[in-house]
Image (cartoon, rainbow, N blue to C red):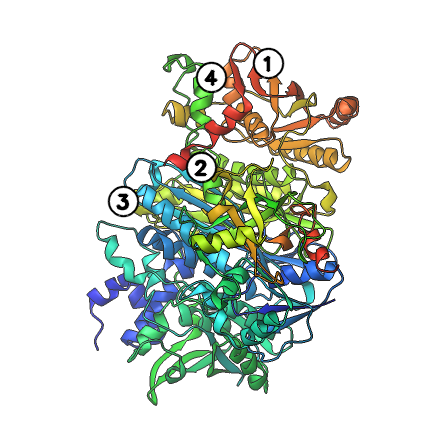
């Protein structure tokens, strides 16, 4: 499986994602934002960080970068795309995913381990998880408060397009377990065709029990299926 | 222009210093030259009051690769790996403008580390604020935490540890100390010493603006009521540019193009060019027309004294200019050859085809003033207060009051604003005795911790200096690391006051004695004097940042209780020393008497025994006993572990408060499985380690019979409320 990690000035989880992909035997390439061609890729990852300093608005400038034209084209042709944290924000800015990521409800950057519940497993990203499995992930963001209009939110629910929802360690949904104020506890969503996933939590930070846990491994291994 | 007395004074120079300048120059300096002298001769850059004392500190052991005098210290951690680290203060700017002050403090210390070729892998900080009910404190806390978070998170280096303390002594002068730790291959370390003549001197990074002019001079004077007006001397940070600069520098350093490199920190272009030339025994000629400027019509004076952030000076090997420029172009950063090295041993500045400054390099460095300031010895204070004279308080009330106050509360509210996990090698976050960072793709790790004890140091600097080194050493031991070396940030008041200078001198003696005894040398550091406002000086606050090595990540350990029915043992002797303790200071507002005594021999023996126990897998958890005494240490082991403890009443005839709140040094609490009791006892006996049984881990309750019984969930809440309500 060939993967590409897009690197913007200010990306800072690019190495971590590459380590995760290599651990799962992906043939990975790092792709610089000024490049105009993508290497042959089965999976494109847009990593976390502060692309272009997050100036203007998180992800807004990266969404207009040269390489993103190629990413959008590939996404529309069905290539798998995973946007993590800032990558999710960028995907939303490109329109590949709908909605918006507002500032966290408490107006502060938040980094902590949280729990999410896997909503659906009949897709390329989650097929190694069990339905409703509870995962420990790590979040680190300032703007992860997912927002969209009621019709779109209903559509996301009706079409099984919400990938993960924030929950308690035992799987309960409540305001106190939602770390950023996100609508319907949304932690990650798919596009209609489910070849694109945007998520605020960092699965690449959960590939090693010694560090924080290994609940992220199955996401990367699902994609190999 | 003739230099008037007022101009000399405005530059923070004494008149005698000005006549020295004239002697060294053999003429009157012009304004630009005077500005350069003031930047190099101020306390912050010249260490003129502290140098003779600092020289007495031990700086070597078999693992030290580079001691003080470089951008940061370097230690050998085996294989091809070296660790580069340093701590630095940004106190004055942070009080005036907390967000930018703290942010640029982080940026500055990171540059010191990646300048040496190391990739930064961890950030820590020590921040001290005034009383929580002081009207400035809340804003300063929010600003400083925001600045540290904003800078570290964006650049993508995990902020993994630190300390936050509140004390009225910092009401008008907060402390913000930032430490950075980096990893480098031993054969790829870069230094600031220039070599060779006619080599290109290259300016890279951000453009130069008018921010931070005279920042270093500001940091070398006390505050007064007009300090607000100094806001323009505070630099503005841009972590995004720093990220680009870091990546570009590290990319360039893979090759052999760089002869030497120096970050433009305090006193900007002036200090970087002078330091590089001085270390190489060379001169430097700079054409100021080439300096990239952010604003129009900047004068040579402004260019030389600006402290705009995210800039570096590099001396390149011949013919490498194009290669290097390509890298900086890729990262969209300025790259300009602004001058060359010479053999004149002078700093020559040209602007508009005119010579604007011509100063012998040594006049700015080795000939800078050096003071052996008068200092007075500080006697060990007498014990006045008697426990029985104090207002009665129940054991439970005292415990709850302490564990719920600002100094002992859980700091999640702060640490969750820092990205602790980015780079994915943080195997232990903040909240324990020390943070642990794995060396990327290896099975070994380093442990890092920062500590200070201003109350102890105020009461008796000599003991305080020793204590703080020992506490830091203990914190590393407690996570299973062999302590290697330290960096120190020495925050003190006005050195022109012999009493304050005495605090400084004796603290250094204390640090020296402890470092020598523990083979725990100082490899880098920073001195921040003149911390005070209107003649009111802060408590002496040396901050120690230590680095230790964990050979095998499997042997790391933390302070949290692991299993019901495990046995809890206290290592080290308890005498019940309450003077200068949190119990006296924070509950009774009593501050007389000496700090707890330090027995270096016991420190070393106890610490080495703990490491042996960890190595042999005989302990389930370890925690150092520090502020708040034994009861606080036990509570910290319970909170977050989901387990409680049943504490036995002490067998000795000590008063309960003395026993549980006393802050005697050299103590650890360990948790062991029942099956290991005999082996542990044997090992402790064999090594003459004093120990006593404390109790046993249990479910649900934190309990001391007849005195205390708290549900552990309740205990967590009590400990985790202060910041959220503040």
Q: Residues within 10 Å of mark 3 (few under 14, many from 20)?
A: some
Establish if B411 lies above or below A138: above
Question: Disc 3 sits on a residue from what chain?
Answer: B
Q: Which residue is mark 1?
A: B650
Q: Residue at x 61, y 11 (%)?
A: B651
Establish if B139 lies above or below B692: below
From where the camera sits, is residue B253 visible?
no
Question: Disc 1 sits on a residue from what chain?
Answer: B
Q: Residues within 10 Å of mark 4 (few under 14, many from 20)?
A: some
Q: Residue at x 39, y 37 (%)?
A: B166
Q: In front: B586, or A218?
A: A218
Sequence-earlier tag: 2 or 3: 2
Mark 3 residue element = loop
Percent x, y for residue B288?
Answer: 38, 82
Q: In front: B166, or B594?
A: B166
Q: Label 1 to label 4, Cα distance in Å?
A: 16 Å
Closer to viewer: mark 1 or mark 4: 4
Res. B231 image quadrant: bottom left
Q: Which residue is mark 2?
A: B457
Does label 3 lie on the same chain as label 1? Answer: yes
Q: Which mark is residue B396?
A: 4
Res. B93 image quadrant: bottom left
């Amino acid at each position: 499986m060939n993967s590409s990690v897009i690197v913007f000035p200010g990306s800072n989880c690019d190495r971590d994602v590459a380590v995760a992909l290599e651990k799962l035997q992906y043939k990975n390439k790092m792709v610089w934002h000024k490049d105009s061609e993508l290497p042959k890729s089965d999976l494109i990852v847009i990593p976390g960080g502060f692309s272009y300093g997050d100036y203007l608005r998180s992800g807004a400038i990266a969404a207009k970068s040269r390489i993103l034209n190629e990413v959008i084209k590939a996404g529309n042709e069905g290539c798998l795309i995973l946007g993590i944290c800032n990558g999710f924000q960028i995907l939303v800015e490109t329109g590949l995913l709908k909605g918006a990521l507002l500032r966290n409800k408490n107006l502060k950057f938040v980094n902590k381990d949280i729990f999410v519940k896997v909503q659906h497993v009949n897709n390329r990203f989650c097929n190694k998880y069990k339905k409703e499995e509870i995962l420990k992930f790590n979040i680190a963001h300032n703007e992860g408060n997912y927002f969209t209009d009621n019709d779109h939110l209903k559509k996301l629910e009706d079409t099984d397009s919400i990938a993960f929802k924030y929950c308690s360690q035992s799987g309960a949904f409540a305001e106190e377990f939602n770390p950023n104020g996100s609508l319907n506890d949304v932690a990650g969503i798919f596009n209609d065709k489910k070849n694109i996933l945007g998520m605020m939590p960092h699965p690449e930070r959960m590939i090693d029990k010694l560090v924080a846990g290994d609940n992220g491994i199955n996401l990367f291994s699902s994609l190999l299926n | 222009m003739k230099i008037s007395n007022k101009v000399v004074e405005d530059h923070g120079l004494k008149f005698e210093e000005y006549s020295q300048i004239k002697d060294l120059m053999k003429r009157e300096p012009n304004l630009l030259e005077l500005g350069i002298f003031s930047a190099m001769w101020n306390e912050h850059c010249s260490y003129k009051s502290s140098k003779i004392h600092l020289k007495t500190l031990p700086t070597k052991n078999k693992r030290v690769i580079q001691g003080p005098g470089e951008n940061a210290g370097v230690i050998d951690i085996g294989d091809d790996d070296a660790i580069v680290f340093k701590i630095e203060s940004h106190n004055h700017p942070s009080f005036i403008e907390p967000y930018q002050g703290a942010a640029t403090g982080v940026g500055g210390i990171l540059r010191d580390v990646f300048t040496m070729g190391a990739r930064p892998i961890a950030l820590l900080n020590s921040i001290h604020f005034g009383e929580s009910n002081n009207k400035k404190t809340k804003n300063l806390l929010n600003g400083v935490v925001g600045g540290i978070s904003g800078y570290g998170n964006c650049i993508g280096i995990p902020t993994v540890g630190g300390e936050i303390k509140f004390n009225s002594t910092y009401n008008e002068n907060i402390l913000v100390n930032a430490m950075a730790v980096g990893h480098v291959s031993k054969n790829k370390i870069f230094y600031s010493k220039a070599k060779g003549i006619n080599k290109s001197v290259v300016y890279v990074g951000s453009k130069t603006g008018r921010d931070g002019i005279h920042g270093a001079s500001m940091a070398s004077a006390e505050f007064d009521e007009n300090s607000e007006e100094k806001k323009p001397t505070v630099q503005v940070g841009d972590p995004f540019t720093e990220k680009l600069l870091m990546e570009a520098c590290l990319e360039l350093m893979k090759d052999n193009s760089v002869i030497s490199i120096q970050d433009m920190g305090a006193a900007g272009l002036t200090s970087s060019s002078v330091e590089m030339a001085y270390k190489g025994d060379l001169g430097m000629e700079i054409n100021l027309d080439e300096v990239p400027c952010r604003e129009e019509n900047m004068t040579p004076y402004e260019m030389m004294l600006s402290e705009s952030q995210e800039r570096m000076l590099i001396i390149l090997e011949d013919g490498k200019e194009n290669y290097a420029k390509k890298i900086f172009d890729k990262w969209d950063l300025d790259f300009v050859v602004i001058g060359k090295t010479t053999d004149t041993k002078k700093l020559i500045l040209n602007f508009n085809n005119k010579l604007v400054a011509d100063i012998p390099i040594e006049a700015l460095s080795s000939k800078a003033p050096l003071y052996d300031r008068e200092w007075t010895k500080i006697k060990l204070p007498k014990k006045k207060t008697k426990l029985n004279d104090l207002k009665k308080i129940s054991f439970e009330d005292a415990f709850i009051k302490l564990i719920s106050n600002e100094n002992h509360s859980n700091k999640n509210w702060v640490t969750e604003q820092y990205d602790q996990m980015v780079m994915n090698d943080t195997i232990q976050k903040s909240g324990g005795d020390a943070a642990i960072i794995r060396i990327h793709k290896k099975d070994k790790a380093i442990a890092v911790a920062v500590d200070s004890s201003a109350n102890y140091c105020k009461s008796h600097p000599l003991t305080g200096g020793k204590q703080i080194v020992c506490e830091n050493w203990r914190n590393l031991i407690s996570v299973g690391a062999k302590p290697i070396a330290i960096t120190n940030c020495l925050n003190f008041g006005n050195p022109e006051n012999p009493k304050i200078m005495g605090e400084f001198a004796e603290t250094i003696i204390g640090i020296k004695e402890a470092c020598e005894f523990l083979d725990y040398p100082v490899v880098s550091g920073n001195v921040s004097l003149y911390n005070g406002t209107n003649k009111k000086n802060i408590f002496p606050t040396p901050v120690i940042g230590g680095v230790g090595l964990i050979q095998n990540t499997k042997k790391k350990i933390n302070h949290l209780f692991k299993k019901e029915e495990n046995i809890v043992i206290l290592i080290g002797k308890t005498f019940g020393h309450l003077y200068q303790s949190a119990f006296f200071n924070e509950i009774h507002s009593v501050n007389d008497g000496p700090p707890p005594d330090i027995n270096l021999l016991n420190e070393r023996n106890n610490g080495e025994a703990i490491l042996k126990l960890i190595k042999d897998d005989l302990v389930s958890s370890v925690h150092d006993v520090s502020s708040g005494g034994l009861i606080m240490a036990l509570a910290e082991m319970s909170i977050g572990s989901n387990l409680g403890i049943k504490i036995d009443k002490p067998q000795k005839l000590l008063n309960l408060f003395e026993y549980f709140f006393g802050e005697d040094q050299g103590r650890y609490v360990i948790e062991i499985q029942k099956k290991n009791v005999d082996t542990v006892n044997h090992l402790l006996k064999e090594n003459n380690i004093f120990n006593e049984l404390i109790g046993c881990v249990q479910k649900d309750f934190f309990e001391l019979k007849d005195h205390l019984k708290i549900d552990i969930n309740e205990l967590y809440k009590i400990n985790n409320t202060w910041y959220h309500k503040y």
